Amino acid sequence: MKKIVLAAGGPSGALLLAPLFSALSSAGGVAPVAILGEPLHPELAACFGLSEPILCSSGARLATLSEAVAFMEERLLAAEPDLVVVLGSDRAALAAALGAAELGLPVAAADAGLRSGETQEQAEMNRRIIDTIADMHFVSEHSGLYNLINEGFDEDRLLFAGNLAIDSLAALMERSGARSVAERYGSGPKKYALMMPGKELEPAQSAMLSELAAILPVIVLKPEEGGETLELPDGVQLVERPEPSALLALLRDSAMLLTASGELQAEATVMNVPCLTLRERTERPSTLEIGTNTLVGLDVEAILHLVGHIQGAPVAERNRSKIPEKWDGAAAGRMAEMLERLVAGS
């Protein structure tokens, strides 16, 4: 039987990997093997019935790109796959693409063609390198197609499968049901804003929080580079990132999302939660065009104006979000079929 390796790094990549691994396992036409830069969250594994063969690093071995490439090459050599699918845009995902290329293995990129236009952003550089290495590109929204075509990629190698992260969203929320998580933090549905500050909580973000908290309590997810020593204004809580379903429930029940990263923008659109992106660009323009997302940068006056508008708008006026094409929770099945045909013809 032909074998496909699915390679990803942290939580964002795992949300793409889990539904695809499950769909390939159920289809039975190929044998999937997962290689992860971090252990898979038990809740996500249980949700999709994932067990072996999943090969994980503790994370400590991936401190540098060279270490990550060595880890991926070792695992790829052991797996002997017919194809490597790279999911995500972090260091581990880039390492998987580089390791596969070094070993002469064909590579397919998931979520291909996403571009923020922030050329110095590490994730943006990783996305471009992965796409350059990949032999096939599975795109999750129309902007991915347009970007890759404009960059000169062969249209015959571009496949529109949909957004795998929405498959994880649908499965996790079905598993968790309608339970609320807000009470953990002393709040209730639609009574707080949720904020994802990115790798660190920057001074400009802290200044914005002081004024925002006067309007609405804010739950801030602890940034990757800590934040325990930050002095936060009244009305702001800094909390550890909860388990995947609880994070999605926290998003669903929030009055709005403020994010400095690309994470949760798509989920906010599908859940119809207003999203204010604290950046000048986004790699998911579909969330701007037909979704709930608005780019605000760090213009405090503009942010507070929009927050006031969202808070004061009638419910009917808020419900204007549409769901982008193929963000329907069925992307993994489509992609699994495409991969089986692709490997069968190789």
Image (spheres, rainbow, N blue to C red):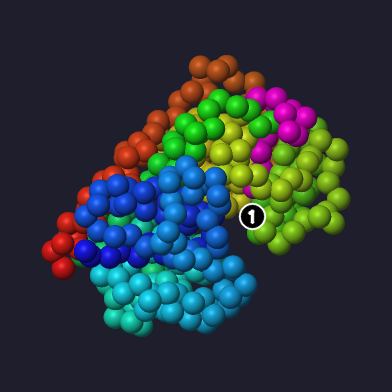
Residue 113 placed where, x, y %?
36, 59
Residue at point 57% right, 16% down? 314
Q: Is residue 184 magenta?
A: yes
- Residue drawn at (72%, 29%), measured in percent from left and top? 183
Q: Which residue is mark 1?
A: 198
Q: Is residue 7 above or below residue 204?
A: below
In this rendering, the answer to whether 31 lies above or below 76 is above
The reply to whether residue 262 is in sight is no
| Residue occupying image coordinates x 16% and y 62% | 344
Q: Nearer the viewer, residue 83 or 133?
A: 83
Residue 129, position as x, y percentages in the image:
40, 72
- Residue 146 percent coordinates (x, y): 30, 54
Q: Secondary structure at mark 1?
A: loop
Quarter occupied by residue 254: top right
Q: Amino acid under label 1?
A: Gly
Residues packed near mark 1 inside 10 Å, few (<14), some (14 to 19) or many (20 plus): some
Tally of numbered discs: 1
Instruction: Locate residue 305 relative to residue 203 in the image: left or right.
Output: left
Look at the image and tell me in which quarter the C terminus lies: bottom left
Horizontally, residue 163 falls left or right of residue 82, namely right
Q: Which residue is depicted at the point 73% across and 33% down?
A: 184
In the displayed structure, would residue 190 be above or below residue 123?
Answer: above
View extreme (left): residue: 345
Q: Is residue 197 visible?
A: yes
Q: Is residue 51 magenta?
A: no
Question: Between residues 267 and 174, which one lies in front from this camera angle?
Answer: 174
Q: Where residue 194 sits in the image (x, y, percent)?
A: 66, 38
Picture quarter with the N terminus:
bottom left
Q: Residue furthest front?
A: 52
Task: Specify whether 191 is left or right of 343.
Answer: right
Q: Which residues are magenta?
A: 183-196
